[in-house]
Amino acid sequence: MPRLSHFLHPARSARRLAQIIGLFFYRTFRSRPLKDIRRGLRDRCWCGGMLSDFKWHRSYGVCGECGTYVNRIPPLQEELSRVYSFDYYWHVRQKSRGNPSIEHRPENDRSDGRVVYWMGLIDRYGAPKGRAIEIGCGSGVLLSELKKHGRECIGVDVDEKSAAWIRERMSLDIRSGIFPDVDLPNCDLFLALDVLEHSTQPLEFMKRASELLNPGGIAVIQAPIDRYSFRKPFEARFDDAFDDLEHLFIFTDKAMRALAASTGLEIVSLNDTLWLMGEMAVFRKP
């Protein structure tokens, strides 16, 4: 139903309508280049468990062993460089979702409280001072903050153009490639924030994280983890969670425990959450 303000402020309403129409056409036409993305088929979970049908989304199955939601038609690994390219991911896909581009992410991530939250979480769980590695480091804003606090920092991004942008703007050591197939030194703090759900190989991802961590080191994983009793997983954010272009696995706490048991890590906490779809799992290397 039209609001009174629409009649009182027709120019404002016209601008808003133009924005909505513009965003619709942007989403419709600019996202088309990835309609031809090549996909594979997956009939088992990362843990080897069999999949049953998921009534809410036909692209996903549910693991009978660990409860992970598994994308049955994931993009092939060699296509990931297209999905996460500097031009498409940061300037087309993010705009189509109403999210900031890489140029505006540092300011956004500081102002919405996530950087303060992450720094507090790292301090709370006592990651030893020393080298920090972040996989999928976004704009580099968290590594930049950690560097100010005296840590040696290394970041990894799938896309070389994105990595070069972060190197130049943030003066950080950023390497390009798809983890775990990236040459990296050992570390005391391993970070993967909104990354593990995008990995084609979460078990190998976490095995490599365990190998890189020094004894006593901490791994902080932020990912969609279904630890709620909603009728529909993630409820209001269901469509964001079950995005079958990007999200290959949606985890459970049981899955996180299984990953820890399979990789020689100890669970420190499964109780922390930044916000819905920003659930945290904290591990320690014995």
Image: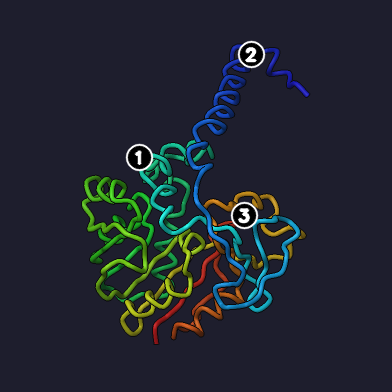
Q: CA distance from mark 1 to mark 2?
A: 33 Å
Q: Nearer the viewer, mark 1 or mark 3?
A: 3
Q: Earlier in the sequence, mark 1 or mark 2?
A: 2
**For the point 58% across and 78% down, which residue is it?**
48
> Of the numbered discs in the image, which one, if any, rests on residue 64?
none
**For the point 26% across and 57% down, which residue is it?**
174
- Residue position marked by numbered label 3 in the rendering: 242
**Is 150 displayed left or right of 233 in the figure?**
left
Q: Position of residue 28 (x, y in %)?
A: 57, 32
Q: Earlier in the sequence, mark 2 or mark 3?
A: 2
- Residue position marked by numbered label 2 in the rendering: 9
Residue in front for this viewpoint, 3 or 14:
14
Q: Residues within 10 Å of mark 3 (few under 14, many from 20)?
A: many
Amino acid type of disc 3? Phe
State if disc 3 and disc 2 touch (CB < 8 Å): no
> Of the numbered discs in the image, which one, if any, rests on residue 103?
1
**For the point 36% across and 70% down, which residue is it?**
190
270 in relation to 90, above or below:
below
